[in-house]
C-alpha cells in the first residue's frame, strides 16, 4: 500500500509479541491515531520527559557513534592530534585512532585516560606514573594537558545555538526544541507540572524556553551568579490572587528542568559548590565548521583555555559521579518522579547506553500505572529490541519508529526528535500565533533597516 502510514507504533501485544498499532492505517489516520494516544497520555497527572544526544543532532550536536563527520570521538581526536602536545601524548591519541576509531568505544578509552590522570595527580598519590601497553609513559603534565584539551573540545562541540530563523522563515529547518516545548507545556493547568530531564550538556532547551517565554526551575537560585539549591524544585509559579475572590491561578508556561549530567554553563567553585551562569557562546561558532588544524589553534587560545570543568565527562566513572552533589539530588528526583502514580514517560534521543540511567528506567517499569513511549527512528536499532523485551514482560512500553519497506533502508527522516516535535505531537494554536507575530516583527525590522539605509 503506497500511502501506508510511514510510522510504526509498537505496543505490548498478546503472547509476548509486539503489535504494530498502525499496521492497517493510512498516512493521515495513522498520525491521528498517534496524536490521539499522545493527547490521552499527556493528560496523565505526572508527565516525565528524558532526552539525550539524539535530540541535538539537527542543531549540530554530535553522537558517540556513527559517521565520522558527526562522531564526537573522531572530531575531538582529529583536532587534538594537531595540537601542540608531547610525542608521548600524541602516541596515546595515535593508539586510539588505530584501535576502533569512531566505533563507539570512546567512553572506555576516556575512562582509562582520566583514570590514569587521577591515579598520578596530587601530592598524596603513591603512584608516580602509568605505563601504557605500547610502552608510552606520560608525565603528570602530559596527562593534564591531554585531559584539559579533551574537555575544551567536547565543550566546543556542545556549545550549540538555536537557529531562531525557524520562527521567521518558512524554509528554515527546525531543531525541534521550540515546537516540542510549545506543545509540551500546552497541557491543562490543573494537571501536574511537566518534568524535563536531559543528559545533554548543551543549552538548546534553555534557549528555546527563553524564546517562548517559558518559566522553569533548574535547581539553581539567583540570577547574576546562580547557585545550586534543589529546594527550588518544590516551588511553583502562580498569578497574583484576585483581591475580591482571594484566588490564585497557575502560570501556564512553566516546567521543572533537570540536567542529569551537568551543563556547559555550570561551574564548580573551589569550595565544591556549583554556580550557573550563561555566557556568550559565539566564540565557539567557528569551531564546529573548522578544519582539524584550525580547531587545534582555537583550542589553545586564551578564550578556550578559560573553559571550566562543566559536568560529568563521558567515562565509565559517570555512575560514581552521580553519587556526588549536585548530581545525587537530580538522580534521586528522577527516580522519585518515575515512581509516581499515573506517570507518562517520553524518551527521545536516548540510546539506553548509560547503565546508571537505564537501571532507573527499568526499575520504574515496575510502576503499574507508568506508560513509556520511546521515539527511535531506526526500526533495526538495538533500542527497539530492548523495548520489545520490556513488552514481553507485559510492560506498558511503546516504540514509535519508521516503517521501512522491504528492500529499503531507514531514512532517518521519521521518528526523529525534530520530526516528532513538528509533525507528530498534537498542534497548539498559540505556537502558530507566536510565529505569525515574529514574522511580522521581522518584516518591520527589515523595513526600518531599508528606510534607514536610504
Image (spheres, rainbow, N blue to C red):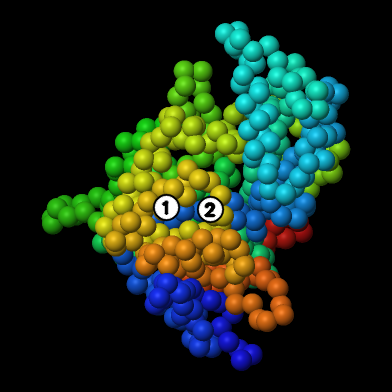
Q: Would residue 363 be visible to someone looking at this image? A: yes
Between 218 and 41, which is closer to the camera in this rendering?
41
The residue lying furthest to the bottom in this view is 1
Q: Which residue does the image show at 29% across and 61% down from the upper left?
A: 368
- The numbered mark at residue 189 is none
Q: Is residue 404 left or right of residue 29?
A: right
Between 178 and 128, which is closer to the camera in this rendering?
128
Residue 395: % across, % down: 37, 65
Looking at marks 1 and 2 on the same chain, the residue that comes earlier in the sequence is marked by 2
According to the picture, the residue beneath numbered tag 1 turns out to be 361
Q: Which residue does the image show at 25% across and 50% down from the upper left?
A: 240
Dots 1 and 2: beta carbons under 8 Å?
Answer: yes
Q: Identify the element where label 1 is drawn.
A: helix
Real-space Cα separation, disc 1 to disc 2, in angstroms: 9 Å
- The numbered mark at residue 352 is 2
Note whether 264 is above or below 411 in the view shown.
above
The residue lying furthest to the front in this view is 15
| Quarter of the rendering containing residue 150 | top right
Note whether 193 is above or below 83 in the view shown.
below
Q: Would residue 227 be visible to someone looking at this image? A: no
In the rendered image, which quarter contains the C terminus?
bottom right
Q: Which residue does the image show at 53% across and 76% down from the upper left?
A: 8
Residue 388: % across, % down: 48, 66
| Badge 1: residue crowd in 10 Å (few <14, some 14–19, many ≥20) | many
Residue 277: % across, % down: 52, 34
Q: Which residue does the image show at 78% across and 19% down from the upper left?
A: 137
In the rendered image, which quarter contains the N terminus?
bottom right
Residue 52: % across, % down: 55, 51
| Badge 2: residue crowd in 10 Å (few <14, some 14–19, many ≥20) | some
Between 352 and 427, which is closer to the camera in this rendering?
352
Note whether 370 is above or below 25 in the view shown.
above
Q: Is residue 279 left or right of residue 425?
A: right
Amino acid at each position: 500500500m503506497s500511502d501506508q502510514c510511514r510510522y510504526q507504533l509498537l505496543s505490548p501485544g498478546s503472547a509476548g509479541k509486539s503489535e504494530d498499532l498502525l499496521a492497517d492505517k493510512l498516512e493521515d489516520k495513522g498520525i491521528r491515531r498517534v496524536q490521539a494516544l499522545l493527547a490521552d497520555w499527556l493528560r496523565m497527572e505526572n508527565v516525565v520527559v528524558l532526552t539525550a544526544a539524539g535530540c541535538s543532532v539537527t542543531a549540530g550536536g554530535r553522537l558517540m557513534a556513527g559517521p565520522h563527520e558527526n562522531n564526537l570521538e573522531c572530531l575531538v581526536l582529529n583536532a587534538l592530534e594537531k595540537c601542540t602536545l608531547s610525542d608521548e601524548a600524541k602516541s596515546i591519541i595515535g593508539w586510539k585512532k588505530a584501535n576502533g576509531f569512531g566505533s563507539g568505544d570512546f567512553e572506555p578509552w576516556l575512562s582509562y585516560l582520566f583514570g590514569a590522570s587521577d591515579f598520578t595527580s596530587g601530592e598524596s598519590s603513591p603512584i608516580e606514573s602509568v605505563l601504557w601497553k605500547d610502552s608510552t609513559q606520560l608525565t603528570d603534565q602530559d596527562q593534564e594537558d591531554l585531559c584539559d584539551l579533551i574537555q575544551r573540545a567536547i565543550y566546543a562541540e556542545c556549545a550549540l545555538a538555536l537557529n531562531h530563523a525557524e520562527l521567521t522563515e518558512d524554509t528554515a529547518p527546525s531543531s525541534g526544541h521550540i515546537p516540542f516545548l510549545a506543545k509540551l507545556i500546552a497541557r491543562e493547568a490543573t494537571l501536574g507540572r511537566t518534568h524535563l530531564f536531559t543528559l545533554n550538556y548543551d543549552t538548546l532547551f534553555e534557549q528555546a524556553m527563553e524564546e517562548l517565554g517559558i518559566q522553569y526551575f533548574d535547581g539553581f537560585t539567583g540570577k547574576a551568579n546562580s547557585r545550586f539549591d534543589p529546594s527550588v524544585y518544590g516551588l511553583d509559579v502562580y498569578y497574583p490572587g484576585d483581591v475580591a475572590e482571594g484566588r490564585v491561578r497557575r502560570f501556564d508556561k512553566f516546567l521543572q528542568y533537570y540536567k542529569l549530567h551537568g551543563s556547559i554553563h555550570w561551574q564548580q567553585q573551589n569550595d565544591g559548590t556549583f554556580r550557573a551562569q550563561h555566557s556568550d557562546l559565539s566564540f565557539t561558532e567557528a569551531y564546529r565548521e573548522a578544519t582539524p588544524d584550525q580547531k587545534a589553534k582555537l583550542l589553545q587560545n586564551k578564550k578556550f583555555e578559560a573553559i571550566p570543568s562543566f559536568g560529568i565527562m563521558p567515562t565509565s566513572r559517570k555512575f560514581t559521579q552521580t553519587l556526588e552533589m549536585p548530581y545525587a539530588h537530580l538522580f534521586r528526583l528522577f527516580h522519585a518522579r518515575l515512581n509516581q502514580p499515573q506517570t507518562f514517560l517520553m524518551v527521545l534521543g536516548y540510546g539506553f547506553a548509560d547503565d546508571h540511567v537505564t537501571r532507573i528506567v527499568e526499575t520504574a517499569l515496575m510502576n503499574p500505572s507508568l506508560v513509556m513511549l520511546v521515539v527511535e527512528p531506526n526500526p533495526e536499532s538495538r533500542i527497539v529490541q530492548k523495548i520489545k523485551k520490556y513488552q514481553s514482560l507485559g510492560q506498558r512500553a511503546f516504540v514509535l519508529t519508521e516503517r521501512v519497506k522491504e528492500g529499503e533502508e531507514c531514512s532517518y527522516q521519521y521518528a526523529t526528535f525534530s520530526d516528532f516535535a513538528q509533525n507528530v505531537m498534537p498542534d497548539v494554536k498559540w505556537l502558530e500565533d507566536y510565529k505569525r507575530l515574529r514574522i511580522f516583527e521581522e518584516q518591520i525590522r527589515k523595513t526600518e533597516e531599508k528606510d534607514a539605509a536610504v
